[in-house]
Image: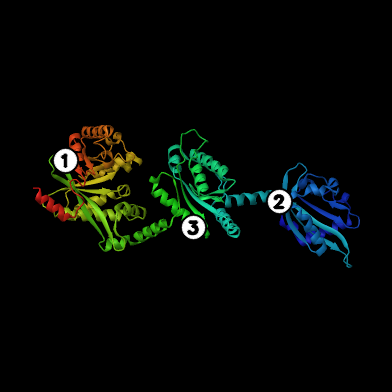
Amino acid sequence: MDAIYTEFEVNNLISFLKKTGQENVDFLGEDIDIFFWSYDYQTNEMLFTNGIKKVSGYTHQEFTELELWNKYIYQEDKYVEDVFIDAFLNKTPFNIEYRIVRKDGSIGWVRSKGKPVFTHHNEPIRFNGLTRDITEKKKTEEQIHFLAYYDPLTGVPNKHLFHKMLEKEVKVAKSQNKKLALLYMDFVQLSIINDTYGQNVGDEVLKSVVNQISELVDKYGFITRYNGCEFFILLRELSISEVEEMVEKIISIVPTSLNLGLESNLRIGISLFPKHTVDVDSLIKYANIALHHIKDNVTNGKGYEFYDDFMMRQVERIAKLTGDFQKGLAQSEFYLEFQPKIEIVTKEIRGIEALIRWKHPEFGFISPMEFIPLAENNGFINQLGDWVLEEAIHHVMRLPKPLMLSVNLSVIQLFQENIVEKLKKILMQTHFPPYLLNLEVTEGIAIFDINKTVKILERIKSLGIHLSLDDFGTGYSSLSYLSRLPFDYIKIDKSFFDKSEHEQSNQKIIQTIINVSHSLKLKVVAEGIETKEQAEAMAKFGCDLGQGYYFSKPVAVEKIKEYMMNNK
């Protein structure tokens, strides 16, 4: 259709209109979305082809009334009249897109192109041009723009538009000395909702939460969807206490679209302009750091955190440790300690648990609580787990007498495709008796496919290896799982009996766990025993084995040898 706008055809049309009256152009039908027009400066006469009715809803007779132009051009696009005047005064062509108000009141888009015609003496003769309906083209452009800059599910700006909006907000805040708060929000429960109730329900819940937040922050800023279940919210000109109040309102939002009794479970990291930074990228970075800090430290109970410099130091520390991991393995910075498992009644040593340690050359001793998650998150855990198992076997085979060796196996390690073959290979290479190996698996396995989990555990057990359910009672598992999972031992977490001497309810729970475990032919290990009273209480409950500082802290293998020699 753009060929209609060629100079050749425009000139032919102008020539035609100059020689004819309106009655001679009626044959140009009403069914096309283009109309040609010509204004005569001497007679003030306007000529149109009938395509004007298709475009505007008005006939060419109605359009000859000059006051109709005030209705025809959309109010916010009245500047078009100035474009026409400038083209006339400067004797130049024009090409412009603008909105019109059709006869039925609907809004459309048109593109007009034309130019004034003058005599050799620079006297105006006519103003000629053509106008084309581009409403559908504009709708397509708007749809493309929407998909490029807005989230199709929630309708809020997306990641690309967010960056543009934030840059503009920071620029204005700098020039006007204003405050901003940037909130990085993670809807952490969304994936669980999707898995439990389905994607459609998850979408409805998400829309409900975002709509409520949009209404809440509308007067103060905006919300954008950044990635999946992550959102950025910008708040203008609020004090820190007001930001906290707003964040608490956001966190308290629950989905209203479905009666599922769900909580949003939102986590929010906050950075402030100009308190923390005046740089756009740093504002995003600091909010991100604060969000990850609150997700890693959910015990503060608030659900949100303001950025603090110590968080950056922590990020730098994590980056350093992650980068030094392989070097640490190669340079023997990792080593093992062993903690005895004692038969509570006889006080005899029945086994030892291998516990990995890391002495970093810069940071000193690093807690396993810190570096194990790093290993899991960065793909090192399988390599580290292999090293622990082989190193532990190497040490245990040099003890005065055989002892059951317990080694922790993470969920990631358990679900390796070749886990069974790997264990079999290590046992064959080291000549270690499989019946002396006990793998401790955390109860986090209970949230995975139970049938798949059972199959993997049974294949491991078929090698002659013993299995323990570690940290029982701290997370997802229940007594009902014990009958399905092929464990030999269950370890009661220390949190269960820390107060057992003083709380009757805890004592009943412990007694129930031990009784049920024994009925399923499982031995029970109480870990974290620190006092004589706890050890006696566990003996009274019928617990089989104990582990903790009351018996021995984790020690080097040489100390285990001494312990065994002294307790023959």
The 10 Å Cα crowd at callout 3, few under 14, some 14 to 19, many 20 or more, is: some
Report x, y in % for residue 300: 40, 46
> In the picture shown, does residue 254 fall above or below 377?
above
The 10 Å Cα crowd at callout 2, few under 14, some 14 to 19, many 20 or more, is: some
Element at label 2: loop
How far apart in space, not on screen, are marks 2 and 1 (Cα)? Answer: 86 Å
Nearer to us: label 2 or label 1: 1
Q: Looking at the picture, which amino acid does disc 1 mark? A: Ile
The one nearer the camera, 549 or 320, is 549
How far apart in space, not on screen, are marks 3 and 2 (Cα)? Answer: 48 Å
Report x, y in % for residue 78: 76, 52
Report the residue marked by disc 2.
134
Tell whether 294 sits left or right of 275. left
Q: Do labels 3 and 2 touch, CB within 8 Å? A: no
Report x, y in % for residue 144: 61, 51
> In the picture shown, does residue 359 fall above or below 432?
below
Q: Looking at the picture, which amino acid does disc 2 mark? A: Ile
Q: Give the farthest residue toward the right.
A: 43
Sequence order check, earlier mark of 1 and 3? 3
Sequence order check, earlier mark of 3 and 2? 2
Report the residue marked by disc 1.
344
Sequence order check, earlier mark of 2 and 1? 2
Could one spot residue 31 in this view of the protein?
A: no
